[in-house]
Amino acid sequence: MPFGSPWRTWIARVLALGPSRIALGLAVLLVLVSLALPFWSLSQAVGTDTDISSFSWTTFTTDRYRGGAWDGTEILPYSSTLSSYRAVASVLATAYLLDLVFLIVLAVVLALFSLEYGRAMPTLSLLILSLIVLGVALVALFFPIVAIPGAATTDVGTFTINGFWGSASTAGPPTGWSWGPGLGWWILLVAVVLGTVGAVLPYVKSIRAMIPSPPPGWRPSP
């Protein structure tokens, strides 16, 4: 057997799935990855000392740097008595739950499009399915953007965090703050794009199939 033949066979089988199922499959994998990664991070710098906290589903991880050098990492569950991020924990519990719901919706749509019935669905049903995927995707993506700033402001207590990402400074002692989305949220963003495209493509294909073909020999007027 020539070298590389198994790879060519595997690639041919993947491509045979079609762009819709490929996009949905990739979206499912990315959502699974996003569930294991932090959705948000908050950095606190005092002089040359910096603490960077990354917020995941059930824990937050703080990397400490002293004099610019790494000094240790602390991982605490939100339920710990040492945790000062109870409001953020509540928001993230909902955010990751929405992420999980999005994963289930994508998996169901992928399974449906893999069946003969799913490939023969009427245009209206495909439109409704596309809108469901889009709605769940947007809620999962934008909920942390809307909810985290207020929760983080409640937990920090010394200044207002007025956006999903940004920076601020406080006095006594002078402290620089910065915050922004974590890797898990960015991966979710890519999954939302892929999942939406994968769900919409069959609907677009169905719409195009409804357009009558021009008669043989027809050419547009000059």
Image (cartoon, grey):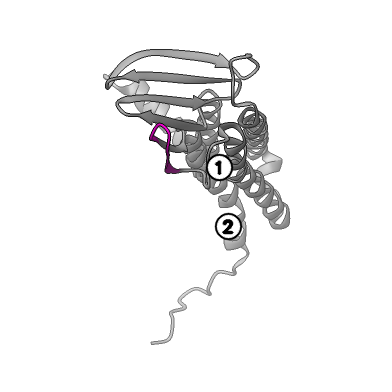
The answer to if 1 sits in the magenta stretch is no
Residue type indicated by callout 1? Gly
Q: Is residue 39 above or below residue 36?
A: below
On residue 195, the disc is: 1
The answer to if 173 sits in the magenta stretch is yes
Stretch of the chain drawn in magenta: 166-175
Would you say 167 lies left or right of 89 here? left
> Secondary structure beneath disc 2?
helix
How many residues crowd around disc 1 within 10 Å: few (fewer than 14), some, or many (20 or more)? many
Report the magenta stretch's main SS.
strand
Q: Nearer the viewer, residue 127 or 80?
A: 80
Q: Is residue 65 above or below residue 17?
A: above
Q: Residue at x 55, y 33 (%)?
A: 156
Q: Nearer the viewer, residue 27 or 118?
A: 27
Would you say 120 lies left or right of 145 here? right
On residue 204, the disc is: 2
Residue 145 lies, in percent from the top left, at 56, 44
Q: Is residue 190 visible?
A: yes
On residue 18, the disc is: none
